[in-house]
Structure formats: C-alpha cells, structure tokens
Image: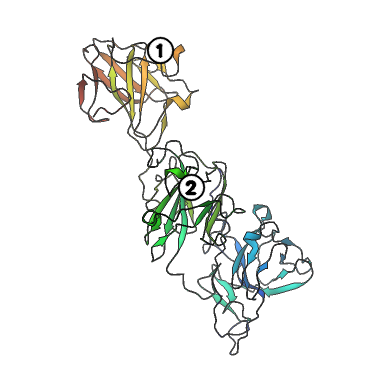
Amino acid sequence: MGGLHKIFYTLVFFAACDVNDTTGPGSDPDPEPLNALVINEFMSHNTLAWAGPDNDYPDWIELYNGSDETIDVGGMYLTDKMDDLTLSMIGDNVPELTTLAPGDFLVLVADGNPQNGPLHLDFKLSDNEDFALVDIDGSTIIDQHNSGVIPDDMSEGRVPDGYSNWEVLDPSTPGTSNGSEPPAGILLYINEFMASNDFGPVDEFGDHDDWIEIYNAGNEAVDIGGMYMTDNLTDLTNSQIPDTDPDLTTIEPGGYLILWADKEPEQGVLHLEDMKLSGSGEQIGLIDVDGITIIDSLTFGDQTTDVSTGRLPDGTGSWEYFGEGYDTMPTPGATNGSGDAPFVLLFINEFLASNDSCFADEFGDYDDWIEIYNAGNIPKDIGGMYFTDDLTDLTNSMIPTDAPDVTTIAPGGYLLLWADKEPEQGPLHLDDMKLSGSGEEIGMIDVDGVTIIDSYTFGEQTTDISEGRLPDGGDTWEFFETPTPGASNE
C-alpha cells in the first residue's frame, strides 16, 4: 500500500479585509495597503499546525493578490537564495490552480520536493533568511521578506492582508484571511472515500461502487446540487451533481452525504455521471457551482481493496486508513473512526451428508456439501485452509490458493464446498473428503494446519435433509427439510 494520502491543493477564496493597518514588522499607527501581489504569510517551523499534501507538516508560503486584477503566478519563482532568483518555479501548466482573482490566497508547499506537484517548492525555509517572489523574467523581485525566528506552529503574516505590517499569528491562517476566525457557515470537506470496492459498502442497487463522502463541518445546511465533482483538477466541471432533488443533495450541519463514483447517473442524483476512482491513485475535487472555485481537493496514491481513506477526526488535515489491517472499518455516512474493528468470524453453518436429489453442483451431480458462513465484517479468502472429516487428520483436504475470486467469502456471505473427492472439478471441490450419512466429524482448519477454526460432530442424517445453525453462526443446530445452500438458514 502507498503512503498516507493527504490533502493536495485547495484554493480557498475570501475577500480581503477592508481595514486600516500599517507597515512594519510589528504594528504601525498608519498602515498602508500595498495593492499588489505579495508574500502574505509563511510558516518555517510546522510540526502539527498544517498537514500538507503528504501529511508531513511542511513549511509553507502564502501568496495574496491585493491588486484589482486577476494574476496567474504560474511561471513565477520562489527562492530562499538571493543569488539564485530562479531556484524554484511555480508550475506554469495548471492555471486553474495558480490563478488568483483579486483578494485570493494561494498556499505553496516549501518542502524541497518539486516533483510532488506544481505548488511544491524546491527549498525549505530556515531561520533568519531572505526569501522572495520573483517575476517570470527570473530577475524582477516582486516581493521579499526575512523569515526571522518564529516559534513552532506559529506563522508570520501581514495584518491586514496585503498591508506592509507583519505580525506573528497563532493560530496560523493558510489559505484564509490573516487574523480571521475559522469561517462560519458553509464548510465542506471531502471526508472519506473508497477507490477499490469489491466487498465493501453497497449502493441502493446492491453494487460495490467507488464512493466519496462529503462532510458539512459548518453551521448551516448546504445543498450541493449544482456543484461539481472531478477526478481531474484540469477538468473542474467533470461531473455535475444535479440540482433537481434538494431533499437528497442537502447536507445538514455536522452531516454526511455519500456520492457514488460509478458513471451511472440514471441510478439517481447521488450517482456521478462521468467519474470513477482509480485504485492506483488520482485526484478528487469538489467544485462550487461556478465551475471554478475549488472547495476541497486531494491527490491520493495506491489504494487497497475494501479499505477507505478518510480524515481523522472528521474535517481535519490528518488522514488515516479504515478497513482490514487497521483499527476500524470504513464509515460511509458516519463519523470516521467510529466503525467496528475489522474481524473475521467463520462458521460451518450448514451441511448435507446424504444428497440424492436436493441440490446439484455445477456439473449436475448431487454431492455432499458444506456451507461456510462469514459472520465478520471483512472478506475472507479461505484458500490455503483445510477441511476434514477426521479431527485426528487436520490437513485432510486443502482449499487451493490460486483462485481467490472463487474462494473469498464476502462479509455476511456464504460459500459452498462440495465433499465429493473430485478436485479436478474446481477449487470448491474437496480432494479427499466425503460425508457419511451415518454421522461423523467436520472440521475447518486454519492455514497453519493446526488451529481448528470450527468443528461439528453430527449423528445419523436423513436423505435430502440438511442440518445447520439457527440463526446463522449461532450455537443451535436444527434440521431443514428445505435446505438453504448459499443463503441464510433463517
């Protein structure tokens, strides 16, 4: 599995404050706005304040457009070496990320990893060094500042935005107005997603589709009808969420909404028309109704099947995995981290030891059969496990390991094994085991060939009548005149 997949580039657009202030460092009694593109805020000791795209808490520099013109900063440079003004170029091929309207902010990641994306810089900030924003000609310094020595997890920024006065800010405000409180009202996040869904949550049609959860961390209900979702941040209007059913597309404060990335818009307004997620990694963006403003976005890497990725806690910059191998299960439509712990719980659930005419295998043969039930919440491949009708011989019949598509049992699912000694008929046909109608043992053994997962000793059986647990996975065994192979005994 790839590394943790964190928030990538989110442009948050706010109007600049119309407040009097000044020049400095420190407060000035007669502030003057610069009315220009400026370095507006930076952090040089980020330990826990802001989780960057790779969740590594990088240094960062915020630009602010204090002019009255739209500016694309793509192709401009940032540098912390005044004798090398072209040290790190801002990507010039993604104007939708690098264009600032008047009053807009843009956060650049000073992590020394320019290969990670167009907003990643080829340097990190140090104490008491000059750094500068340089025009596309590579020689004109647009703005520069000295980093000084700022305490951990505090930033330094212009207050108000775009003025010459600098102050230490705690908390910092990357991407928002300096000195501002956290925004009230509408606050939407891409909160959890699953890009490879084989046995995970199903939509209302029973399909295991990719899904994206949107979380409303604000204090107002928000109808996302008319907004857009995309898996390509160069195509912001990829899939529009219909605005025809606000009852379905409205998210209450503190609420969640699941969108299905299945390219099946005919299934309803929550099914995206032209978007599926890639398990090998890509982008996700939530775009406002104007088709331009990126409300939230992220870039993720390789995903594991049936494991989701989500913010923990909800709406924060910290991302975790949920599913098999992790602490809790995915929670579409609920608080991340509140799911049950992943677990497998297998049972010998039903069997038929004398089958004359009740249920035939795929070859039309009326063979003995054993049903296995997965009462757990994650899929389980039983390939490599053993079955036996003699608990003194625990490795009697091994399930082949080369057909996981056939030998995997979904959560809450059933799998039928044929005790026919005909392994040539497929991986579900036991190679050295038939059941006795006069009674014997059945054992299910783990891949170590030692651990008995489940076993049952039965007595004399009646032809075409099965015996099974009721309820499924329970302790009580009953006979069934109408057997239920591959289905619930209830």
Within 10 Å of disc 2 (Cα), the crowding (few <14, some 14-19, many 20+) is many
Q: In what element is the residue under mark 1?
A: loop
Give the residue at the far front of this rendering.
244
Query: Could you tell me if residue 472 is visible in this image?
Result: yes
Q: Which residue is drawn at 66% across and 67% down?
A: 126
Q: In what element is the residue under mark 2?
A: loop
Indicate whether 112 appears above or below 39. above
Query: Could you tell me if residue 110 is visible in this image?
Result: no
Image x and y of residue 471, in percent: 23, 31
User: Which of 331 and 222 lies nearest the eye of the viewer?
Assistant: 222
Left or right, 117 with respect to 318, comes to: right
Number of marks in the image? 2
Identify the residue under disc 1: 363
Within 10 Å of disc 1 (Cα), the crowding (few <14, some 14-19, many 20+) is few
Image x and y of residue 101, in percent: 61, 69
Amino acid type at image mark 1: Phe
Left or right, 404 with respect to 126, comes to: left
Amino acid type at image mark 2: Leu
- The colour scheme is rainbow
Image quadrant in which the C terminus is located: top left
- What label sits on residue 272 in the rendered view? 2
- What label sits on residue 257 in the rendered view? none
Indicate whether 443 appears above or below 226. above
Image x and y of residue 345, in percent: 34, 33
Q: Quadrant of residue 280?
A: top right
Indicate whether 305 appears above or below 312. above
